[in-house]
Image (cartoon, rainbow, N blue to C red):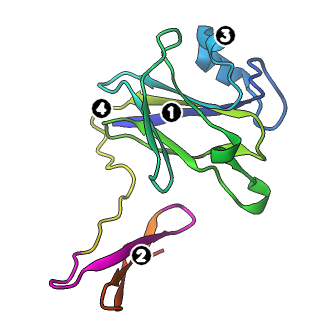
């Protein structure tokens, strides 16, 4: 399984210690190392995968509506996803969080969540996933859709999530006007 072992940010593409909120730290620069000249983007998610069988990163929205897989760039070894203000801006002062997530594609992996552009500033997020063989962690909880009753046709199925993005319940609306509320996770 892949563990998320590093998560840090840079602001405005500045690749030196930056005391501003979301600015690069010396520790972050040490993690990036010699590749810093290739990773100075201002609105990206940069992902490095260390060890194990994984190579690519899957970037996806929290509702899983958008999914993109990226290979590592040959010049840096980091996978890159470009965020825009339209698809990633949010206001943390209003309790909002970023819309994007990242995980190692095709492998059991931690998920880095709530990534975006706070205050619509130019903030890049750096992630490092490290192979940790045989730790037995099953990963994030994934909702299991309930079985549909025989003879009824569902017209809409929606899942509601709590503040930690865990599924709470699913509503199933049927063509005959009836509906069901199935609890998946109790707080």
Q: Which of marks 3 and 1 is in front?
A: 3
Say above or below: 34 vs 49: above
Label 2 to label 4: alpha-carbon separation: 33 Å
Please state which of residues 115 and 133 is positioned toward the viewer in this rendering. 115
Residue sticking out furthest to the left: 150
- 37 relative to 132 in the view: left or right: right
Which residues fall within the magenta stretch? 147-165
* Sequence-first disc among 2 and 1: 1
Q: Name the residue under label 4.
A: 133
Cβ–Cβ under 8 Å for marks 4 and 3: no
* Residue at (75% x, 54% y) in the render: 91
Residue where numbered disc 3 is placed: 37
Asked if the residue under mark 1 is in contact with the one under mark 2, i.e. CB atoms within 8 Å, the reply is no
Question: How many angstroms separate mark 4 from mark 3 (CA)?
Answer: 32 Å
Relative to 73, residue 122 above or below: below
The residues tagged by marks 2 and 3 sit, at their Cα atoms, a distance apart of 46 Å
Mark 2, mark 4: which one is toward the viewer? Answer: 2
Give residue 21's position: percent from left, percent from top.
81, 38
């Amino acid at each position: 399984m892949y563990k998320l072992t590093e998560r840090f940010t840079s602001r405005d593409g500045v690749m030196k210690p930056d005391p501003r909120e979301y600015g690069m730290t010396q520790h972050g620069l040490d993690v990036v190392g010699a590749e810093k000249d290739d990773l100075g983007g201002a609105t990206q998610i940069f992902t490095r995968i260390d060890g194990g069988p994984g190579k690519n990163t899957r970037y996806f929205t929290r509702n899983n509506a958008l999914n993109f897989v990226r290979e590592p760039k040959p010049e840096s070894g980091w996978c890159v996803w470009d965020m825009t203000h339209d698809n990633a801006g949010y206001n943390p002062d209003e309790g909002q969080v970023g819309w994007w997530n990242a995980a190692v594609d095709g492998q059991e992996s931690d998920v880095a969540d709530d990534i975006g552009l706070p205050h619509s500033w130019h903030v890049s997020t750096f992630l490092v996933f490290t192979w940790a063989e045989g730790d037995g962690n099953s990963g994030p909880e994934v909702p299991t859709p309930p079985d549909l009753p025989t003879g009824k046709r569902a017209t809409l199925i929606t899942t509601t999530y709590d503040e930690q993005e865990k599924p709470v319940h699913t509503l199933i609306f049927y063509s005959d006007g009836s509906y069901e509320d199935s609890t998946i996770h109790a707080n």
